[in-house]
Amino acid sequence: MSEGNTTDQIAEDQRNGVEAIREFLKSKTSYDVLPVSFRLIVLDTALLVKKSLTILLQNGIVSAPLWDSKISRFAGLLTASDYINVIQYYFQNPEKMDKIEHFTLDGLRDVEKAIGAEPIETLSIHPFKTLYEACGKMIQSKARRIPLIDTDEETHREIVVSVLTQYRILKFVALNCKETRKLMKPLSQLNIGVYENLATATMTTPVIDVIHVLVNKGVSSIPIVDEQNRLLNIYEAVDVLSLIKGGIYTDLSLSVGEALMRRPEDFEGVHTCTDQDRLDTIMDTIRRSRLHRLLVVDEDGKLKGIVTLSDILKYILYGDD
């Protein structure tokens, strides 16, 4: 078989593989992805921000659905971005720092308006809607997770069932859809990820500067590099949570290197790949390891780009047509 035929065959297999995965996503509901047993933590909007942070950290989670008990309705999804909004607010209004102890979750709307931030995520989907629809909603809203909301048949009140993440969906696909083996094109041919104008920081960059970049760029992580642009680590929005636990906001002047020393021991690590890695091997990595993004490096370990789970999901839903 000539090289041209081999290339054509790989392209055809890739198209067939992507189409098969789409059909798989259309055939499964969001409910199908949930494990037999799982824990769900829902926070009341009347809860103090400081207490909500303690609950997230104690339970090893980075987000939680919010519940407005006054009207018995789902009130959005609390994420690391909301705590970063609070940091930005008090950075801009230091004279109000003494009020932070009494700040409740239902006041997050005021913080968003004051700093011009995106409103808290209120996206949701019914558990019996298809995975394909759930993925489409997440991609359109740029959300990395989506709460599953049902309605009680007798009271007609909303019920928060669980929260579905992009990682959980892609792992479900990797475990149950054998057609992922057909995705043999390398990243360099898929046109997914970001390779230009990448925001980076160094170990000496103050954390508060990194937070500003996270907000201004609308990203969830910043690669940490050395003077030669070699990848050293990554600073994520969720890393901010462990830095402000206990309501201490003065540690934000720490350098990234100092802040990373406080990272929890269960940090999953930095996942890297090259632009020659194929999507089938990446899906296999997702099957075996918890990851949220892949940092693309060259043979010298220098940063070239970032591929997120959103990029992969978007490609599976809309790419290769």
Image: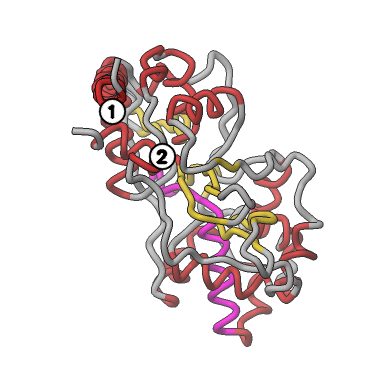
> Is residue 79 covered in magenta?
yes
Q: Nearer the viewer, residue 287 or 111?
A: 287
Element class at badge 1: helix
Name the spot of residue 44 as percent of width and height, x first: 53, 47
Element class at badge 2: helix
Nearer mark to the viewer, of 2 and 1: 2
Name the spot of residue 47 as percent of width and height, x first: 59, 54
Q: Which amino acid type is shown beneath numbered disc 1?
A: Tyr
Tally of numbered discs? 2
Left or right: residue 144 versus residue 128 is right
Rendered residue at 41%/62% (across/down): 196
Q: Earlier in the sequence, mark 2 or mark 1?
A: 1
What range is drawn magenta here? 70-93
Query: Which residue bears the numbered disc 2?
Result: 187
Q: Which amino acid type is shown beneath numbered disc 2?
A: Leu
> Is residue 106 covered in magenta?
no
Left or right: residue 275 versus residue 28 is right
Q: Nearer the viewer, residue 264 or 321?
A: 321
Query: Which residue bears the numbered disc 1?
Result: 132
CA distance for labels 2 and 1: 23 Å
- Is residue 69 something one can see in this rendering? no
